[in-house]
Amino acid sequence: MYIEIDFNSDEAIYQQLCNQIILGIATEQFADGEVLPSVRDLAEAVGINMHTVNKAYTVLKQEGFVKVDRRKGAIVSVDVNKERAAAMTKRDLQPVLAQGLCRGLSRADIHTLVDSLCDEFGV
Amino acid sequence: MYIEIDFNSDEAIYQQLCNQIILGIATEQFADGEVLPSVRDLAEAVGINMHTVNKAYTVLKQEGFVKVDRRKGAIVSVDVNKERAAAMTKRDLQPVLAQGLCRGLSRADIHTLVDSLCDEFGV
DNA sequence: CCACTTGTTATACGGATTATATAACAAGTG
DNA sequence: CACTTGTTATATAATCCGTATAACAAGTGG
């Protein structure tokens, strides 16, 4: 999978890494059980420090997206829990929707955007 | 409008302020043209520093949610631009949807959450 | 004119976070 | 035993966050 970092972004590098890997899982570019690159390899490939990658992997582990095997590395393994997922997603969705609605989007516009993204994700 | 700060949150105080004010605008608790509390009053009411409120107001101004009148204060005035709003919302929506989908939500589940939030907002 | 309020700016300080760097360790592989 | 894996420990520089004190420009109302 292609991972690219925007060093001028106000978003932390480890956060960008997390988001892109989660995006990769959602789009099934990373399959369940697949091994992510080692922290050293990914750091080398992207041009950042090993610890920054390690932090991203640690966050992904805490948030239930990967499991870590000492001998292999970080393995994609998503904790599926629809109830919790719905609560989390709703919480994260709230400020985004509020902004969009303020700026003139309708409920239908939001649904269109959701469908558009789901299509791009291939879901 | 009721504004409450979670001092234990990992979200910055000024960011929480911004989100709650935007939420207030979306739910029409703050009408267009309405004057927000002065930076000093709001800081006093919430129990934070004046500059933290000022930072929130500055961000809201830059993002096109309020205009500032020297004599009155910060006035709710949202820049409506559907095209830009759609692009911004889509960008912000992407990581949220990716997470939800990874965790087992379906496209329909997302739509349900959007409707649920819109209903709560009264849109 | 004067006291008062408005946002704004400058400066400073302590604390936390971010990213880097070097180094070492435990554990499993081949 | 050499090699890789993640992990941990320090250290450092930079940035951000929140607070604090102070002052300024500008408009309001007595």
Image (cartoon, coloured by chain):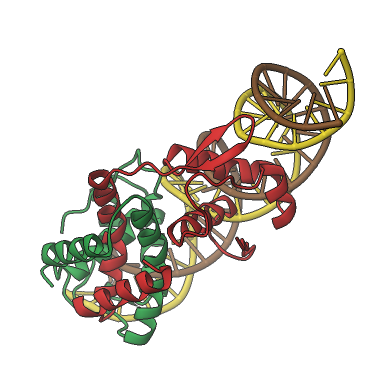
Chain colours: A green, B red, C yellow, D brown
Answer above or below: position of C12 versus B61. above
Q: Is residue B20 left or right of A110 when viewed as pictured? A: right
Return the x and y of residue A113 as percentages of the image width and height. 20, 60
* Residue at x-position 62% and y-position 66%: B8
Q: Nearer the viewer, residue B3 or B37?
A: B37
Quadrant of the frame with the C terminus of chain A: bottom left
Return the x and y of residue B120 as percentages of the image width and height. 42, 73
Quarter assignment of residue D24: top right
Return the x and y of residue B70 as percentages of the image width and height. 61, 29
Q: What number of labels is visible?
A: 0
Q: Nearer the viewer, residue A44 or B15?
A: B15
* Residue at x-position 41% and y-position 55%: A51
Quadrant of the frame with the N terminus of chain A: bottom left
Task: Work out whether residue A81 can be spotted.
Answer: no
Return the x and y of residue A20 as percentages of the image width and height. 26, 59
Quarter assignment of residue B65: top left
Answer above or below: position of A10 versus B93. above
Quarter assignment of residue B93: bottom left
* Residue at x-position 59% and y-position 47%: B36
Task: Work out whether residue A18 can be spotted.
Answer: yes
